[in-house]
Amino acid sequence: MKNLQLTQEPQVKAAMLIRKPVAEVFEAFVNPEITTAFWFTKSSAKLEAGKSLTWTWEMYNVSVQVNVKEIKEHKRILIEWGDPGNMTNVEWTFVPYESESTYVIITNSGFQGNGDSMIAQAFDSLGGFTTVLDGAKAWLEHGIKLNLIKDKYPKGLTEH
């Protein structure tokens, strides 16, 4: 493991086909009344370009600042999120597929710190956004609330 060096900044992509129309899938990610069924537990506002808001995961006593950079209805969401001074960019791309499905791509970039820290953040991000997409698919396609985020790190069972 000597002299390992990053030659480019890590960027994470998670993707999933959701068998619902693009308008419905897009709305699920901008409207916290829907998003709370599969991701965070509370939001201070709906996603709108130029807004700053807070997302909260009450079961973990964690909140994160979200700055909405751009919204292109039914096509793209771009945010900056994290702790002040250590924020990353997250982009959702919504691609209509066949007649009534949407391919969602979530890209996270802008990790900070040394190489080891950036790689750890990237792996954590990939796992997290994959879980979010899995939960969104179950909720939107079947109305099933899987509690994936809530059950990811059960109190007393993990080192997280």
Image (spheres, helix red, strand yellow):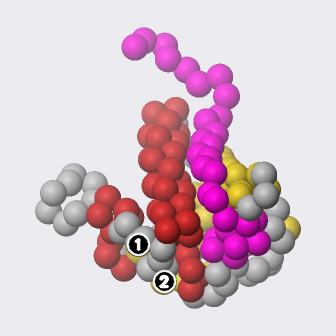
Q: Secondary structure at mark 1?
A: loop
| Picture residue at 63% right of the left edge, 74% below the top | 28
Mark closer to the chain start, 2 or 1? 2
Q: From what the image shows, is residue 87 above or below residue 61?
A: above
Identity of the residue furthest to the left in this view: 156
Give the SS element for disc 2.
strand
Q: Is residue 93 visible?
A: no
Q: State the image quarter where residue 77 is shown.
A: bottom right
What residue is disc 2 on? 42
The magenta-colored residue range is: 1-29
* Residue 34 visible from this viewpoint: yes
Quarter location, residue 11: top right
For marks 2 and 1, give the one nearer the viewer: 1
Residue 23 covered by magenta stretch: yes
Amino acid type, callout 1: Lys
The stretch drawn in magenta includes residue 77: no
| Residue shown at the point (56%, 69%) measured from the top left | 140
For label 1, the residue is: 145
Q: Amino acid at mark 2?
A: Lys
Circle 1 packing at 10 Å, graded few (<14), some (14-19), many (20+), is: some
Extreme-top residue of the structure: 2
